[in-house]
Image (cartoon, rainbow, N blue to C red):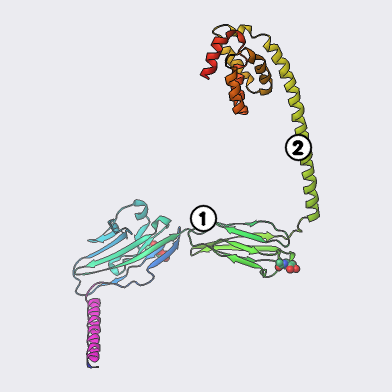
Amino acid sequence: MVTMGKRLTCLRLQLAAIFVVTVLRGTDAITITSTGPQTIQKAQGDTVTLGCTYSTASTDTGSLDIEWLNVRPDMTQKDQLILSYTGGQMLHYGDPSLSARLSFTQDPTQGDASINLTGLKTTDTATYQCKVKKSPGVDMRKVTLVVMGPPSVPKCWVKGSEYKGSDAVLQCRSSTGSIPLTYVWTRETGGSMPPTATQNGQSGELLIRNNSQSYSGNYLCVVSNPVGQAQCQYTLNAYDPPNKAGIIAGAVIGALLLLLLLLFLIWLLICCCHKRRYEKEVAHEIREDAPAPDSRPGSRNSSFRSVLGYRSHAGVVYSSVRNARPNRTQSSNSSMKNGRNNSMQKPSEQKVAPVPPPVLKYDSAYGYAV
Ligand SMILES: *[C@@H]1O[C@H](CO)[C@@H](O)[C@H](O)[C@H]1NC(C)=O
Ligand SMILES: *[C@@H]1O[C@H](CO)[C@@H](O)[C@H](O)[C@H]1NC(C)=O
């Protein structure tokens, strides 16, 4: 108990000492007397006053020295001096686009070193420090300025359908403006907000479940942030949903038409193929009659070209291969291959096929090479 009491007395003494020191300092030296918010929010284009009133003490005998600094958020960077009053002279520093908009609100020697910054830009967002010195006294104050862009005029539209019984979603969105943006939907005409309506102030969505005639009318969206607001409007309707029987009938008819079209296409294809195959057969017969010029030595290229030409018409070529086979030395080999993989081997058979029998030696070499 005794030690407890001693401790309390000790604490009281300490508090008293702190109080005395504070009071003494207050009367003894220069003190910035400006109060007000540490953070000021302003809209783009506005003028802001950064307050820095001060009172001097009789002990402060030195010359008055006032400095305004732009305090960098990054500790490793040097704070930027932007305005000073030293030796009876006012001086601007740094970025001219800032200093041109910066001035003391009045004669800074008369206890008010506040500044005005006009034509605010979002890039002026920073922490500013006022430092008043009159030796040996010195004091300083920091204030953070946040310059915000007001929201642009939003767009209002509906997402999804506006049919009776379905869910309608009204969307409101502002494309520019400093965050946080807040959206509020209200109903302008036709009564109070539908009981099935829910809204999201951050996304700007108004969901109206089970839309009905009684919900139609004008809805207003207001978007705001601390420095401005804007609005748009949407007229909600409640249309009769399309006839279901009609949709089904339409779908059935559509499907039938599609089927007919497919059948027609298939018929067309079959017809066409038959015709072309017949034409090819005729053409090939004519060509088989004239392989003689091809067979002369050094005509490899031309025979190869004809090979390529045949490749796409397997049926035709196949019959010619059969015709040629009895005259060929490697025919057994290729027929073995053919047995193994019928579909794969067709092209290789085609290659040898058009080469006529008279150049047997040359042709076999070619066949093996491939
Ligand atoms: C400073 O700005 C305030 C508005 O913030 C204005 O009323 C005042 O006249 C301005 N003073 C000077 C000297 O520009
Ligand atoms: C939708 O609204 C109608 C009246 O407009 C009501 O009869 C029906 O029960 C509602 N449906 C749902 C799912 O709430």
> x, y (%) of residue 76?
28, 56
Viewer-nearest of labels 1 and 2? 2
Assign a secondary structure to mark 1: loop
Viewer-nearest residue: 296 or 256: 296
Q: Residues within 10 Å of mark 2 (few under 14, many from 20)?
A: few
Residue 30 against residue 154 in the figure, above or below: below
User: In which image quadrant can residue 315 be found?
Assistant: top right
Mark sitting earlier along the chain (1/2) = 1
Please report contact status of discs 1 and 2: CB closer than 8 Å, yes or no: no
196 or 331, nearer to the observer: 331
Q: Quadrant of ligand 1?
A: bottom left
Q: Is residue 299 left or right of residue 31?
A: right
Can residue 9 be found in the magenta stretch?
yes
Residue placed under numbered mark 2 in the picture:
262
Q: State which region is magenta.
A: 3-30
Q: In the figure, 307 relative to 170: above or below?
A: above
Determine if the magenta segment contains residue 16: yes
**How far apart are the alpha carbons under marks 1 and 2?**
52 Å
Marking on residue 234: none
Under mark 2, the amino acid is Leu
Q: Main SS type for the magenta part?
A: helix
The structure residue drawn at horizontal position 54% and vertical position 10%, both measured from the top left corner, is 362
x and y percent of residue 31 in the render?
A: 27, 72
Q: Considering only vertical position in the picture, is 257 above or below 90?
A: above
Q: Along the line of sight, which residue is nearer the eye, 109 or 300?
A: 300
Q: Is residue 121 visible?
A: no
Q: Residue 114 at what x, y percent from top left?
A: 34, 66
Q: Quadrant of the N terminus?
A: bottom left
Q: Describe residue 268's horizontal placement relative to residue 107 as left or right.
A: right
On the image, numbered disc 1 is attached to which residue? 176
Residue 41 relative to residue 14: left or right: right
